[in-house]
Image: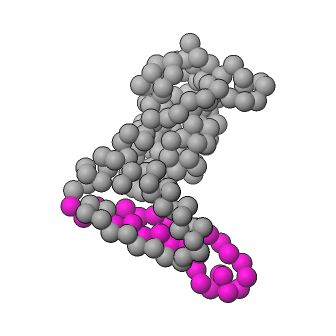
């Protein structure tokens, strides 16, 4: 099961109104919970969708489907000021980290020159750390997300001036 299928499953469960769905496959177990019954009866509805993937057999088989989804999509930014820049967006939902570990320097800074395939950041999703690589060459103009912040799918992360 790849990340797109998991995202579609989350959307489907949220729209269906079910409070909890459990899915077990050969190498993965997923539980999706949406809001508690108590919050619904009070009239307020807070949607919570924690997703847990727990490999039962081997970790590489569970992580392998997510690997193709770690390459960012790039598009030209739409605002007039940023029209000459390329936007690098998040390919997955997770927590954005600028450093490979707390004691290491950031992958890139504003002004850094990057090439295709250079690591830009790490996004943690379901306890897996996915290294996001550049699909463009150029210079980092702006970092749009704070370190250790949650990011959504397709959320802009960096502005790059193409080389």
Q: Is residue 111 left or right of residue 130?
A: right
Looking at the rendered image, the quarter that the C terminus falls into is: top right
Looking at the rendered image, the quarter that the N terminus falls into is: bottom left
Does residue 149 appear in the picture of this structure? no
Specify how the rendered protein is coloured: one colour
Does residue 75 appear in the picture of this structure? yes
Above or below, 134 relative to 4: above
Q: Which residue does the image show at 51% across and 38% down from the upper left?
A: 98
Q: Position of residue 124 (x, y in %)?
A: 45, 49
Find the residue positioned furthest to the top. 163
Find the residue positioned furthest to the right. 80
Above or below, 55 relative to 61: below
Viewer-proximal residue among 62 and 10: 10
Q: Does 154 appear in magenta? A: no
Q: Which residue does the image show at 25% across and 49% down from the upper left?
A: 60
Above or below, 39 relative to 107: below
Q: Position of residue 114 (x, y in %)?
A: 49, 20
In this rendering, the count of numbered labels is 0
Q: Position of residue 160 (x, y in %)?
A: 60, 23
Q: Is residue 22 left or right of residue 44?
A: left
Q: Which residue does the image show at 46% across and 50% down from the upper left?
A: 4
Q: Which residue does the image show at 34% across and 47% down from the upper left?
A: 65
Q: Report the span colored magenta.
A: 29-57
Q: Position of residue 40 (x, y in %)?
A: 66, 82
């Amino acid at each position: 099961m790849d990340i797109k299928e998991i995202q579609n499953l989350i959307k489907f469960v949220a729209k269906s109104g079910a409070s909890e769905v459990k899915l077990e496959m050969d190498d993965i177990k997923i539980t999706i919970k949406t809001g508690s019954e108590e919050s619904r009866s009070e009239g307020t509805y807070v949607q919570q969708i924690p997703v847990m993937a727990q490999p039962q057999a081997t970790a590489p088989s569970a992580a392998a489907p997510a690997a193709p989804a770690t390459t960012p999509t790039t598009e030209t930014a739409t605002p007039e000021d940023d029209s000459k820049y390329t936007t690098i967006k998040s390919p997955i939902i997770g927590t954005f980290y600028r450093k490979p570990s707390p004691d290491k320097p950031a992958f890139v800074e504003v002004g850094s020159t990057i090439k295709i395939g250079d690591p830009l950041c790490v996004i943690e999703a379901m306890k897996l750390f996915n290294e996001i690589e550049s699909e463009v060459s150029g210079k980092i103009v702006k970092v749009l997300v704070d370190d250790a912040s949650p990011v959504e799918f397709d959320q802009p992360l960096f502005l790059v001036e193409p080389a």
